[in-house]
Every structure is written in structure tokens, then in C-alpha cells.
Amino acid sequence: EETLALVFWTKDPRRLVRGYDVDLAGRGYEIKAHVTVTGWAEVEHGVMDMVDACGWTEALAQRIGPKNVSWRFSPVPMGLPDRDRDSTGLLDRFERAARMLCHATRECYISFLQPNDLMKETRDAPERIRLLRAMADIAARYGIEVILCQADHTLDGSEPYPNLRAGICVPAEGFGG
């Protein structure tokens, strides 16, 4: 009775699309979904191929509305094989996803590897800020805002940058309207 909304976090949106027939929204629940789309399937278990993930995320947005779907490019991939070995490859991957997701969402939540992750983050703060700004520029071309997880303090003390801010994944003001 006190539940206002349900928030799903997934690497595989197929289950949400297929299972949405349960009609949770019809019972008065707002539905929000955070979908991880990094294309980092070669490293992270359970992450879908980028093209498939984007297609299923688009299908989910058609069911629950783009305002209720958030793209998670998290953790920001590193050590990508072959052509994606450097930051330019990472940004190419980010742009491919942004292009495919521009009709499915208006926001992209980002975080870098955290101390509790299995891999250690090797990029220093200036490199992370450079990447965040580059991703904000790319995302702006597709109408998507970049939001750095508030628990990641990379932006603390840095100059504000267009289309980039720190925030929380599920803000209370995102419900009830």
C-alpha cells in the first residue's frame, strides 16, 4: 500500500518487456527501469550485445515511456580489446549506444569502477573528467543528459560543464507526476 513505484535495474531488458503483461502500472505503480548498456559483454557477465540491448531498451521505452527509462553506461568500460583499446574507442562505443538509445531515454547515468568492484579503476581524475565531458558532448547531440553517480566524487570541485551533472539514480522528485 505504501509502495509508490517499482524500479528495475537490469542488464537484460528482455525480461521486463516480456513480463510487462503483469500490468503493474495498471495497479497504480509507477514503473522505472535502469538498463545497463555498455557493450562490455566481453568482460562483464550478463551484459547483452549492444545492438540487442538497445533494441530491447527501445521496446521497453515503448511500453513504459522514455521518461521512465534510464540508460546506465556503468561502469565505464576500460581495457577494451583491439580497436577499442584507447579512450577514443570507448567514446565510439558510447556514441553508438547514444545514437541507438536516443528515442528510448533522455538520461544516461555513469559511474567509473568503484573500490568494491573486481577490477581497479586506473584512470586518474583529470582523465575521468575529460571522458565525462566528451560523453556529455556526444550525448547532447542525441538529446541525452549525462549524470555521474553522486557516490563518485570525480566532479567535486570541477567547473560546471554543459549537459553534465552529478545526481542520484532514483531521485524522489522523479515520482508522483
Image: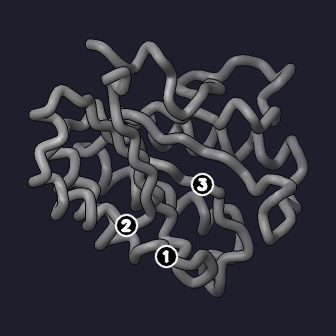
Q: Residue at x 39, y 20 (%)?
A: 174
Pointer 1 with pointer 3, Cβ within 8 A: no
Q: Amino acid at mark 3?
A: Ser
Would you say 28 lies left or right of 50 here? left
Above or below, comparing residue 68 to residue 43 in the picture: above
Pointer 1 with pointer 2, Cβ within 8 A: yes
Instruction: Specify which label sits upstream in the sequence, 1 or 3.
Output: 1
Q: CA distance from mark 3 to mark 2?
A: 14 Å
Corner quadrant of residue 117? bottom right
From the viewer's side, name the closer residue of 81 and 113.
Answer: 113
Q: Residue at x 65, y 26 (%)?
A: 166
Which residue is outermost to the front? 1
- Residue depth check, mark 1 versus mark 3: number of the one nearer the observer: 1
Would you say 33 lies left or right of 156 here? left
Above or below, comparing residue 142 to residue 86 in the picture: above
Q: CA distance from mark 1 to mark 3?
A: 13 Å
Q: CA distance from mark 1 to mark 2?
A: 7 Å
Q: Amino acid at mark 1?
A: Gly
Q: Say which residue label 1 marks.
A: 46
Looking at the rendered image, the quarter that the N terminus falls into is top left
Instruction: Specify which label sits upstream in the sequence, 1 or 2.
Output: 2
- Residue depth check, mark 3 versus mark 2: number of the one nearer the observer: 2
Report crowding for label 3: few under 14, some 14 to 19, many 20 or more residues within 10 A (C-alpha): some
Corner quadrant of residue 63? top left
Q: Secondary structure at mark 3?
A: loop
Q: Say which residue label 2 marks.
A: 12
